Image (cartoon, rainbow, N blue to C red):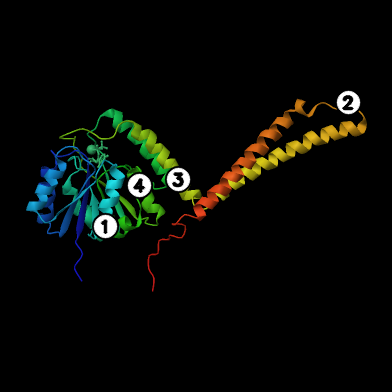
Amino acid sequence: MEEKLNISVVVPLYNEDESLPELHEWITRVMRDNKFTYEIIFVNDGSTDRSWNVIESLAERDAHVHGIKFRRNYGKSPALFCGFKAAQGQVVITMDADLQDSPDEIPELYRMITDEGYDLVSGYKQKRYDPLSKTLPTKLFNATARWVSGIKNLHDFNCGLKAYRSEVVKNIEVYGEMHRYIPYLAKNAGFDKIGEKVVHHQARKYGHTKFGLNRFVNGYLDLLSLSFLNKFGKQPMHVFGFLGTLMFIVGFIAVVVVGAVKVTHLINGTPAPLVTNSPYFYIALTMMLLGTQLFLTGFVAELVSRSSSSRNDYQIEKEF
Ligand code: UDP
Ligand code: MG
């Protein structure tokens, strides 16, 4: 059987033609100095500049270079997904194409995976060279992500420079804009040896950032979805059914109160107030309606998740 490569470097890129030759040269130098067997997979995410021409000409000169070209721009997560699928190495390293991440970090990241047994090691740009408008919200974002995901030791979820044991990338599915939460995806898949390494960071040399401030809004929404999916994705009825039933019971009690008051008055022959005069009537109405809605939502969600093709996907680590 063919020996597995030591390292696959996966580089998602969108309009980064100026950086690519320098990045390629730098990665190559590091790989040679450390005698790694390797491949570099450039995933061209629908660039409209000369990026693809550059990749083709690099590949002509260097057999380590592979290219994947999207017909249009899909985003960083889809680019990573396809890069992960193609990767052959024992350890997969992702890095941004803009030269903000340093290839000099690769040997140590590789060592942490192979020798220290980490499943995933994330870079941590402790000293960043980005504008304040980005670094400040990033701090908040990471604090929330740490809290929601329960991965307490990560400071920089969205760092483009990460290293993975190959099983990790083959067993998680990055989609949408979930590249921000790969450590969380990995953890949910059962890969919980997640580490961090402080890495050097540089200001962008060429081009400009591809993500605006809306990254934070979308980032938070994605985090909510992930946390919800993880907790209730497989049994939505457990949350909706519970809330629905609870509300329905409260509503039902209110109905009984309203009804009992009315009936007592009737029995005693005293003039009974209209049920619509009682606040309990409105509580009953709202609660029973909401309760039914929630319950039905839960039931529909249950049917949807039951017919999903991944309903019986489990992470099996070993089998004989
Ligand atoms: N990127 C991509 N597709 C996109 C947007 C970005 O492949 O739709 C790549 C981009 O070329 C870069 C990496 O993702 O290699 C990180 O993007 P960027 O440097 O703009 O993000 P920032 O460093 O500002 O977080
Ligand atoms: Mg960048």
Task: Tell me the crowding category of disc 3: few under 14, some 14 to 19, or many 20 or more residues within 10 angstroms, Cα based.
Answer: some
In this rendering, would 1 be left or right of 215?
A: left
Gap in angstroms between the C-alphas marked 2 and 4: 65 Å
Question: Where is residue 276 drawn, in percent x and y?
Answer: 76, 27
Give the residue at mark 1: 113
Indicate whether 122 appears above or below 258: below
Indicate whether 244 appears above or below 316: above
Question: Where is residue 4 drawn, in percent x and y?
Answer: 21, 64
> Furthest residue to the bottom?
320
Residue 19: image quadrant is top left
Give the residue at mark 4: 175
Give the SS element for disc 1: helix
- Give the amino acid at mark 2: Pro
Circles 3 and 2: CB atoms closer than 8 Å: no
Circles 2 and 4: CB atoms closer than 8 Å: no
Residue, x 51% and y 51% (percent of image)? 304
